[in-house]
């Protein structure tokens, strides 16, 4: 444990309060991980918890997500649904090795994610959003966001942060910049900051289910890292309701079945 | 006869013995002391490296709107020199206005996250827009480019010394030879003092009747430089001589030479002193030592004698003359060949202008010092050469300083009652500028003259906000509604008439300005016109505690008394808090933390500290938009509408602030990209007698006009869930074609009026619903 702390402190040159937080967060993860894996489904009976998306926003909150098309819930037998899942999974880009379990954490919604929305087409490319009609601020902001994203993928969240902070200066309406800032903070172990940035990203997105799903899924990751597993599950469910192909959520949910390992996304 | 003589002799002898022995004792003690001084200088921490404070970097991208003048000004401030042909070396630029082309050879820069290697770029401009940026070397398009941060100031102890230490092995031999040739040709032969050159100097000086030539060796000069004070007394010269001898005994020629080359004073850049040849090479030629030509080397060597008098910045003629003297000496001493000499003599000195380093944002620097003091001692800051990167925008800082100083002068000119005799208790002001999206403090001016008063009114002065507090009341009303579930919208009719508010056994009767009451008005109108009674009534309806909570939530940190008069700003806050709170509105309900210090690096380029942008969503974007939409009215129709007539026409929201006793005048105003708060008043709480619109607004307007010149016009974007409809402000209902005055109003979806105006009946046209 102490080696972990020492290693972390070496990798991340951060100041004292953040360091302490990182240590606490790591402790939380390790602690959560050493607990016995909790079953995903509590009981076959529907729980009475509300299906509203968990968020730390203040009231009144206006949900921008388009409602998923209503679907009859099929009779509850595990096998046919699992078969359905498998088919759905084959349609998504990346196959999970184990069947993705159903997201019936809140079965009272009466909605099964896979049956709702087919996986959305990948809208992840930022450069593709630059058209001749895009304002120069937005275009510059998107390009910088892309650079930040690449830095993040290359494993340099600190550098990504510096780059991404510029994107919101140039164009504060660019929600993707906020999303990747959230991701950078997440990678640096700053889960609370990450959640704050996700709130902002969510409020600046309008009608983009692919990205909203990304927001919810990353929110789930943060909650999980903070040990708030209920909220994490709810967020993943929310993500998958919008986009059953959301990789973060599907991976995370699959991992919840296995003994937990630190996420690599 | 012999005895008295013997006694006299013995007395004399003994006294002589005493004198001699005490002389020896004192002498050796003195020598020991000098030796300690020399050792301490050579072996102890020799040099202090003041930490440097940098402004924010400046991002250029294709499509950005800016004035080419501003960009050129920025390049000059950064130390770039204009050339007449495309630049060939770092630190040069070439502007062709007729072709709209700006070629810049970027400097290297060590950023916190990366080492940037400068390369040449070509910037294409069309009017005020950058249409393309290209890497001139590769031809590749560059989409965004960061211009390095500007050095604001150094945190130095007493004197600002700029120096980069080079080991002797990295100094090109010709540089050493040139300096030795002109300053101390027998350096390797003497032992610290050179009698030959001393005698020659005496001879020459006697002949010319003044001190024309020095006879000091390099070692002596080094000793002289080790002392800061420059007393040219004989006793000092003797002391230097003895120390030189000591130094030569203890240390090798190479050690002395290395120290010398790094110690010598070679010029002045404003308040910065240039020390050491590495720094000089950069200062005069923007080149590393290894790239210097023979002529340039000779110029540097020649400067040692009198760096300011012989500076090429001061007189090309004097500099050239001196250089040629050095070249001749180098030729005589066979340091260079005849051919080299001929070439070097023909080299023309680059004509450069000395960049004047103007005053260095002292109030902002003070604020930075405070932030830094949390983690770094003064000793570390003034000696260890940290590099501190900040949010400051030097251009905005200058504009802010100018606007404040000129604005206050204008007020004194227009209102004689504000004038004061002498230096005490003068009219004062403060201005702070934030970028709402990130919380970065772009500019901060804590008073009209740092020389006179270092008190920084931006964050140290707690003053009454007065009516600038009112928006919190209206926001609380929109958020929580009133008693009995009463809902407030911008079109809700409210009452503006005298009333009595009983609270906690006390009674308060708020009065309007000029005792003028407007009766029934819209929620919006009450805010635009800053009506006291209406505001107080709303506050009573909503509950003063809710108002207080909203203020805290948005960013006011000072404690606020939950009493009725809080609604009209009876509390004490700083301009910085006000800025933070309103920037939450400007930033769509997302609160940020004020950011001044961004990164701290040590000289080895290790990041010691990074302060990130922090965000917190405290308000829904819908409510934030509605507040901004309301506050736009203050500028368009309300107490600040005169700003429009003064030439500030951009979409912006704001609020005037005046206190009941006319002791404080405020204005806070913002676009989606820039927010500024201005405060005007007297430190001793003398009566100002002016409203926010009269005293603070002119300064704000002047600042914003200059600060936003030729930047793209941005407006607040309504988020989903907001409906903008046309209403008649007299009735608060949907406008009909018969309504004489129609206003666009923003509502939360579902709150918009559904009935048409009863005052001017008619069927409304299909109102254009914008979203």
Image: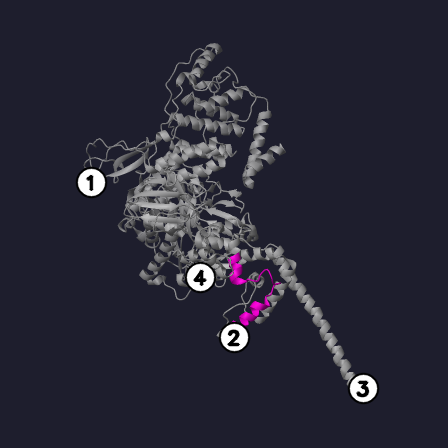
Residue B324: image tag:
4
Q: Earlier in the sequence, mark 1 or mark 4?
A: 4
Is residue A148 shown above or below A68? below
Q: CA distance from mark 4 to mark 2?
A: 25 Å
Q: Mark 2 belongs to which subunit? A: B
Q: SS for tag 4?
A: helix
Q: Is residue B456 visible?
A: no
Q: Does the magenta-highlighted stretch encompass residue B513?
A: no
Disc 1 + disc 4, Cβ < 8 Å: no
Is residue B305 shown above or below A223? below
Q: Is residue B321 left or right of residue B256?
A: left
Q: Position of residue B365 (x, y in %)?
A: 47, 52
Which residue is tagged 2?
B206
Q: Is residue B753 left or right of residue B441?
A: left
Q: Nearer the viewer, mark 1 or mark 4?
A: 4
Q: CA distance from mark 4 to mark 3?
A: 73 Å
Structural crowding at the residue carrying mark 4, measured as other residues with C-alpha within 10 Å and reported as few (<14), some (14–19) or many (≥20)? many
Q: Mark 4 belongs to which subunit? A: B
Q: Nearer the viewer, mark 4 or mark 3?
A: 4
Q: Earlier in the sequence, mark 1 or mark 3?
A: 3
> For the view shown, which residue lies furthest in the front direction?
B338
Q: Mark 3 belongs to which subunit? A: B
Q: SS for tag 2?
A: helix
What span is in magenta?
B177-204
């Amino acid at each position: 444990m102490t080696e972990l702390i020492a290693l972390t402190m070496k990798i991340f040159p951060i100041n004292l309060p953040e360091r302490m937080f990182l240590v606490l967060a790591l402790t939380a993860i390790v602690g959560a991980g050493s607990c016995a894996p909790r079953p995903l489904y509590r009981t076959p009976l529907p729980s009475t918890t509300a299906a509203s998306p968990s968020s730390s926003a203040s009231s009144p909150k206006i949900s921008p997500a388009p409602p998923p098309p209503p679907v009859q819930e099929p009779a509850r037998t595990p096998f046919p649904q699992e078969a359905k899942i498998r088919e759905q999974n084959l349609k998504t880009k990346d196959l999970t090795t184990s069947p993705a379990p159903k997201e019936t954490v809140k079965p009272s919604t009466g909605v099964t994610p896979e049956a709702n929305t087919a996986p959305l087409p990948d809208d992840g490319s930022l450069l593709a959003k630059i058209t001749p009609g895009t304002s120069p601020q937005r275009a510059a902001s998107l390009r910088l966001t892309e650079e930040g994203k690449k830095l993040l993928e290359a494993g340099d969240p600190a550098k990504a942060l510096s780059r991404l902070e510029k994107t919101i200066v140039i164009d504060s309406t660019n929600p993707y910049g906020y999303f990747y800032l959230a991701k950078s903070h997440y990678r640096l172990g700053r889960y609370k900051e990450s959640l704050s940035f996700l709130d902002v990203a969510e409020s600046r997105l309008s009608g983009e289910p692919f990205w909203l799903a990304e927001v919810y899924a990353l929110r789930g990751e943060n909650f999980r890292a903070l040990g708030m597993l209920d909220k994490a599950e709810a967020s993943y469910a929310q993500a998958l309701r919008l986009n059953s192909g959301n990789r973060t959520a599907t991976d995370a949910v699959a991992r919840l079945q296995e003994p937990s390992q630190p996420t690599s996304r | 006869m012999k005895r008295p003589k013997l006694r006299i002799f013995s007395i004399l002898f003994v006294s002589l013995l005493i004198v001699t022995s005490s002389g020896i004792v004192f002498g050796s003690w003195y020598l020991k002391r000098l030796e300690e001084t020399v050792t301490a200088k050579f072996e102890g921490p020799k040099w202090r490296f003041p930490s440097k404070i940098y402004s924010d970097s400046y991002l250029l991208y294709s499509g950005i709107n800016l004035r080419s003048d501003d960009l050129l000004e920025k390049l000059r401030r950064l130390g770039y020199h204009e050339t007449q042909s495309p630049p060939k070396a770092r630190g040069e630029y070439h502007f062709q206005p007729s072709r709209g082309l700006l070629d810049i050879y970027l400097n290297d820069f060590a950023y916190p996250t990366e080492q940037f290697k400068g390369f040449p770029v070509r910037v294409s401009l069309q009017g005020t827009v950058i249409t393309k940026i290209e890497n001139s070397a590769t031809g590749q398009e560059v989409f965004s480019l960061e211009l390095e941060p500007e050095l604001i100031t150094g945190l130095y102890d007493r004197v600002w010394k700029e120096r980069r230490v080079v080991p002797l092995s990295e100094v090109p031999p010709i540089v050493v030879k040139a300096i030795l040739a002109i300053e101390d040709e027998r350096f390797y032969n003497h032992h610290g003092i050179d009698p030959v050159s001393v005698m020659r100097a005496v001879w020459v000086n006697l002949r010319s009747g003044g001190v024309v030539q020095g006879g000091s060796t390099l070692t002596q000069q080094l000793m002289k430089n080790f002392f800061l004070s420059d007393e040219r007394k004989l006793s000092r010269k003797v002391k230097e001589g003895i120390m030189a001898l000591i130094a030569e005994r203890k240390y090798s020629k190479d050690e002395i030479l290395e120290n010398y080359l790094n110690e010598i004073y070679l010029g002045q850049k404003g308040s910065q002193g240039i020390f050491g040849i590495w720094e000089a090479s950069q200062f005069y030629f923007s080149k590393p030592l290894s790239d210097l030509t023979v002529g340039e080397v000779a110029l540097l060597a020649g400067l040692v004698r009198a760096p300011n008098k012989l500076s090429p910045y001061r007189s090309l003629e004097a500099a050239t003359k001196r250089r040629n003297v050095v070249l001749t000496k180098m030729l005589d001493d066979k340091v260079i060949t005849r051919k080299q000499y001929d070439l070097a003599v023909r080299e023309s000195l680059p004509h450069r202008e000395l960049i004047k380093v103007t005053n260095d944002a002292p109030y902002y620097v003070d604020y930075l010092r405070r932030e830094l003091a949390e983690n770094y001692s003064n000793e570390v800051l003034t000696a260890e050469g940290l590099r501190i990167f900040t949010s400051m925008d030097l251009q905005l800082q200058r504009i802010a300083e100018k606007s404040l100083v000129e604005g206050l002068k204008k007020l004194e000119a227009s209102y004689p009652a504000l004038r004061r005799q002498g230096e005490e208790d003068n009219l004062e002001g403060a201005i702070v500028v934030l970028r709402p999206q990130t919380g970065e403090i772009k500019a901060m001016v804590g008073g009209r003259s740092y020389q006179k008063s270092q008190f920084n009114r931006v964050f140290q002065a707690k003053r009454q906000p007065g009516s600038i507090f009112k928006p919190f009341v209206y926001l609380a009303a929109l958020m929580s509604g009133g008693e009995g579930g009463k809902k407030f919208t911008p079109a809700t009719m409210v009452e503006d008439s005298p009333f009595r508010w009983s609270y906690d056994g006390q009674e308060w009767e708020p009065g309007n300005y000029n005792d003028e009451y407007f009766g029934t008005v819209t929620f919006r109108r009450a805010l635009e016109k800053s009506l006291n009674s209406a505001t107080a009534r709303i506050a009573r309806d909503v509950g003063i505690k809710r108002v207080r909570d909203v203020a805290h939530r948005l960013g006011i940190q000072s404690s606020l008394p939950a009493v009725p008069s809080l609604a009209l700003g009876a509390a004490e806050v700083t301009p910085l808090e006000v800025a933070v709170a309103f920037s939450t509105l400007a930033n769509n309900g997302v609160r940020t933390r004020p950011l001044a210090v961004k990164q701290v690096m040590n000289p080895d380029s290790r990041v010691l500290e990074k302060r990130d942008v922090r965000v917190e969503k405290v308000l829904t974007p819908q409510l934030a938009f509605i507040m901004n939409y309301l506050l736009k009215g203050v500028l368009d129709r309300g107490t600040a509408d005169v700003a429009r007539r003064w030439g500030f026409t951009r979409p912006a929201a704001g609020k005037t602030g005046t206190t009941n006793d006319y002791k404080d005048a405020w204005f806070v105003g913002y676009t989606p990209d820039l927010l500024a708060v201005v405060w005007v008043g007297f430190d001793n709480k003398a009566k100002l007698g002016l409203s926010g619109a009269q005293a603070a607004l002119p300064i704000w307007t002047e600042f914003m006009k200059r600060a936003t010149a030729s930047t793209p016009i941005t407006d607040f974007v309504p988020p989903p869930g907001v409906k903008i409809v046309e209403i008649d402000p007299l009735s608060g209902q949907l406008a009909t074609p018969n309504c004489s005055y129609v206003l666009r109003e923003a509502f939360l979806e579902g709150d918009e009026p559904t009935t048409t105006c009863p005052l001017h009946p008619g069927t409304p046209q299909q109102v254009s619903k914008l979203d």
